[in-house]
Image (cartoon, rainbow, N blue to C red):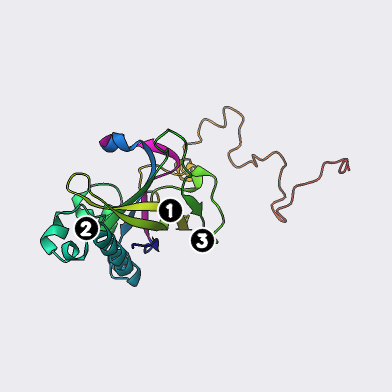
């Protein structure tokens, strides 16, 4: 029986991990948590990638039997989770060779919420702020390959957990971080408004030498 397995590290794309969303192509599946992981040549050549392929193969055996799993023509007729990056024009695909999509349901058949995938950082600490997760970061998934027989059949990757292993990365979703967006802004209007763009904007003025807030002239009130 196919087991849960960790993917190689890849580039995160289309993360929908905090609030489930319905895929318009598969409306019948309802809202779901999902993400894409892009693998470069090194990842595709890794033992982790080979182990992932082995678990996908095991899911084929579990669903259709060993004889079918050894029939190359049959296997090639299935919809498998490994896709060529060259088949898509999405941002970041030029940096990879293969990509996989993984997802899990956001609701059960009665419309009750399902638990979302766990999301942790490099130290395995929970990430609870959605703004900390975006397309372009390096990540790896814990997934569960399973076969399905609807249509022509295939193997999906159930998404259990996500680990963001490098957060400070360039975004590939077309958005800029706020600090980059305003880094080279034209501040010519500020003088007329009496604003010094180099002034400290925090509530307490900072002492540049020590990095400590300067106490009030009358001393601390406690």
Q: Which residue is mark 3?
A: 122
Location of residue 8 with respect to 91 vertically, above or below = below
At a point 16% along the width and 59% down the height, the residue shown is: 75
Give left or right: position of 42 versus 170.
left
Quarter occupied by the N terminus: bottom left
Quarter occupied by the C terminus: top right
Q: Nearer the viewer, residue 47 or 41?
A: 47
**Inter-mark Cα distance, 3 to 1:** 17 Å
Q: Residue 84 is drawn in which quadrant? A: bottom left
Name, please, the residue furthest toward the left.
73
**Inter-mark Cα distance, 3 to 2:** 38 Å
Name, please, the residue furthest toward the bottom.
47
Identify the mark at residue 194; answer none if there is no mark. none
Name the mark nearer the viewer: 3 or 2.
2
Instruction: Give SS at disc 1.
Output: strand
Range of residues picked out in magenta: 10-25
Residue 87 lies, in percent from the top left, at: 19, 51
Q: Is residue 14 visible?
A: no
Residue 95 lies, in percent from the top left, at: 29, 58
Q: Which residue is mark 2?
A: 64
Marks 3 and 2: CB-CB under 8 Å? no
Q: Nearer the viewer, residue 183 or 60?
A: 60
Residue 204 lies, in percent from the top left, at: 72, 41
Give left or right: position of 219 versus 15.
right
Please tell me which of labels 3 and 2 falls first in the chain. Answer: 2
Q: Residue 143 is drawn in which quadrant? A: bottom left
Please tell me which of labels 3 and 1 falls first in the chain. Answer: 3
At a point 22% along the width and 45% down the height, the residue shown is: 150
Give left or right: position of 30 versus 81.
right
Q: Which residue is mark 1?
A: 160
Give left or right: position of 41 versus 171.
left
């Amino acid at each position: 029986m196919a087991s849960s397995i960790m993917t190689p590290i890849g580039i995160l794309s289309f993360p929908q991990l905090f609030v489930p969303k319905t895929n318009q192509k598969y409306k019948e599946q309802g809202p779901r948590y999902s993400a894409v992981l892009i693998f470069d040549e090194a990842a595709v050549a890794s033992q982790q990638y080979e182990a992932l392929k082995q678990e996908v193969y095991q899911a084929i055996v579990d669903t259709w039997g060993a004889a079918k799993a050894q029939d190359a023509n049959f296997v090639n007729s299935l919809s498998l989770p490994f896709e060529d990056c060259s088949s898509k024009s999405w941002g970041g695909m030029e940096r990879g060779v293969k990509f996989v999509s993984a997802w899990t349901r956001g609701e059960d058949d009665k419309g009750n919420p399902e638990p979302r995938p766990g999301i942790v950082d490099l130290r395995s600490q929970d990430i609870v702020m959605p703004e900390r997760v975006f397309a372009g970061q390096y990540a790896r998934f814990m997934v569960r390959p399973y076969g399905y027989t609807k249509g022509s059949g295939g193997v999906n990757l159930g998404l259990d957990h996500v680990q963001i292993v490098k957060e400070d990365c360039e975004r590939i979703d077309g958005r800029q971080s706020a600090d980059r967006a305003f880094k080279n802004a034209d501040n010519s209007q500020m003088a007329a408004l009496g604003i010094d763009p180099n002034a400290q904007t925090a509530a307490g003025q900072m002492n540049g030498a020590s990095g400590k807030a300067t106490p009030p002239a009358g001393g601390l009130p406690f």
